[in-house]
Amino acid sequence: MVSSSTSFAARIHESIAPNALRAYLAEFISTFIFVLSAAGSSMSSRKLMLPDAKSDPSSLVAIAMANAFGLATAVYISVNISGGHANPAVTFGKVVGCHMQFVTAIFYWTSQILGSITACLLLKITTVEHNVMTHAIAEEMTGFGASILEGFLTFGLVYTVYAAGDPRHGPIGSIGPIAIGLVAGANVLAAGPFSGGSMNPAYSFGSAIVAGSFRNQAVYWVGPMFGAAVAGILYDNVVFPLRDPDCLTRADGFRV
């Protein structure tokens, strides 16, 4: 019991160390930048292409490109500080894969959600009469189907994050964030009209908070978290297994 209490106290202390605080700030900034680009592109497309924004393919392409560029940039600027998650699902995948302590992940999630809310709030205030767009599922789809789709999309994203950031493949460099951004953009092109192509619970929650609409919000939490967990387990234990079976020795908390 004493050993367990000491271990928990050590994890808490590690989670509020200066390096940890810098990591949380980096996650806040990177998530802010990504959501500002992604949510802003949706609002811009709606303004420029009314009344056919939803049915115009060029609108989907523009949003997908903004997601790809925004995420690649967000990952690049924070990868050497916090790991460049900018997404609660990515953080959860790292926890399941034993690359991060759960206590640290809670602070990551808080930073990511605050970054998303701040970006959406900025868009709401500065654009005055325009509403922040929320993720929505197609009328013909069920919440369960949309959740499954979001799960598979997030699986692809988090699997790419694992592969791009694996030190066994060499330094991540600049190609890693580009690969991560490209898979996000491709997923938006593939599923945007059906489930919104979120893959990011912080983005969906932040836009829902500011817009005041929480319809189908569970879709954008359950699906992505499940997909991220499967990606973390599959990559490290099946496709590219680690030599060290003890995950606790691999949990550094930050540069993951």
Image (cartoon, grey):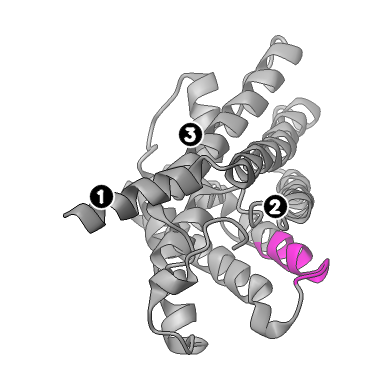
Coordinates of residue 185 in the picture (x, y in percent): 70, 57
SS state under label 3: helix
Judging by the rendered image, the residue that carries numbered circle 3 is 205
Q: Earlier in the sequence, mark 2 or mark 1?
A: 1
Q: Earlier in the sequence, mark 3 or mark 2?
A: 2
Q: Main secondary structure of the magenta part?
A: helix
SS state under label 1: helix
What kind of residue is marked 2?
Ile
Judging by the rendered image, the residue that carries numbered circle 1 is 5
Marks 1 and 3 sit apart, C-alpha to C-alpha, by 34 Å
Marks 2 and 1 sit apart, C-alpha to C-alpha, by 28 Å
Task: Name the quarter where the N terminus is drawn.
Answer: bottom left
Q: Which residues are magenta?
A: 172-183
Q: Earlier in the sequence, mark 1 or mark 3?
A: 1
Please give left or right for residue 193 compared with residue 103 in the image. Answer: right
Marks 3 and 2 sit apart, C-alpha to C-alpha, by 24 Å
Q: Which mark is residue 177?
A: none
Please give left or right for residue 18 compared with residue 230 in the image. Answer: right
SS state under label 2: loop
What kind of residue is marked 1?
Ser
Camera-near label (2 vs 1) is 1
Coordinates of residue 197 in the picture (x, y in percent): 56, 51
Q: Residue at x 45, y 44 (%)?
A: 13
Image quadrant in which you'd find residue 46? top right
Camera-near label (1 vs 3) is 1
What kind of residue is marked 3?
Phe
Pick the residue in front: 240 or 106. 106
Camera-near label (3 vs 2) is 2
Coordinates of residue 47 in the picture (x, y in percent): 76, 25
How dense is the environment of label 1, judged by Cα within 10 Å: few (below 14), some, or many (20 and up)?
Answer: few
Judging by the rendered image, the residue that carries numbered circle 2 is 81
With respect to residue 153, does 210 lie above or below? above
